[in-house]
Amino acid sequence: MIGEIRGTARGQIPARLIDLSVGGALLHLSMPLEIGAIHDFALQIEGHTVWVQGEVKRCEPAAAGPGHQLGVEFIGIDPSDQRLLQSYLAARRA
């Protein structure tokens, strides 16, 4: 035997968006994610899918009911998706 071989699996986990900003999001998921882990997230904004890469900064059991709340900092986003996100957030503030 060569030795221990490790890997990771990618999957889709439904999430509920609690809060959103240009720099990150607060999400509710059914399962925890490791703090410091980097994941791809798909946000549905006005009929468009915006893909962001985010680092999990916080993961805690949800205060009410099952699941976990995750604080995610966006570390990668396509410039056109970033413009869409900024436009959406500006319109919601107005």
Image: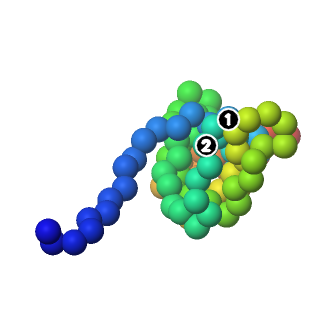
Mark 1–mark 2 distance (CA, rounded to whole Å): 12 Å
Q: Quadrant of residue 46?
A: top right
Measuring from the top left, give residue 60's x and y in whole percent: 74, 53
Measuring from the top left, give residue 33's x and y in whole percent: 58, 53
Question: Along the line of sight, which residue is nearer the eye, 85 or 33?
Answer: 33
Quarter of the image that includes the C terminus = top right
Q: Is residue 40 visible?
A: yes
Q: Quadrant of residue 91?
A: top right
Q: 40 left or right of 30?
A: left
> Which amino acid type corresponds to the residue marked 2 in the rendered image?
Met
Q: Nearer the viewer, mark 1 or mark 2?
A: 2
Residue at 71% in and 60% down: 58
Residue at 78% in and 43% down: 62
> Which amino acid type corresponds to the residue marked 1 in the rendered image?
Arg
- The circle on residue 16 is 1
Quarter of the image that includes the N terminus = bottom left
| Secondary element at tag 1 | strand
> Eyeballing the image, is 55 above or below 81?
below
Measuring from the top left, give residue 84's x and y in whole percent: 60, 44
> Eyeballing the image, is 61 above or below 12?
below
* Sequence-earlier tag: 1 or 2: 1
Question: Along the line of sight, which residue is nearer the eye, 16 or 90?
Answer: 16
Residue at 58% in and 67% down: 36
- State the residue lying farthest toward the top: 47
Q: Quadrant of residue 28?
A: top right
Q: 42 left or right of 20?
A: left
Q: Which residue corresponds to mark 2?
A: 31
- State the residue lying farthest toward the left: 1
- The circle on residue 24 is none
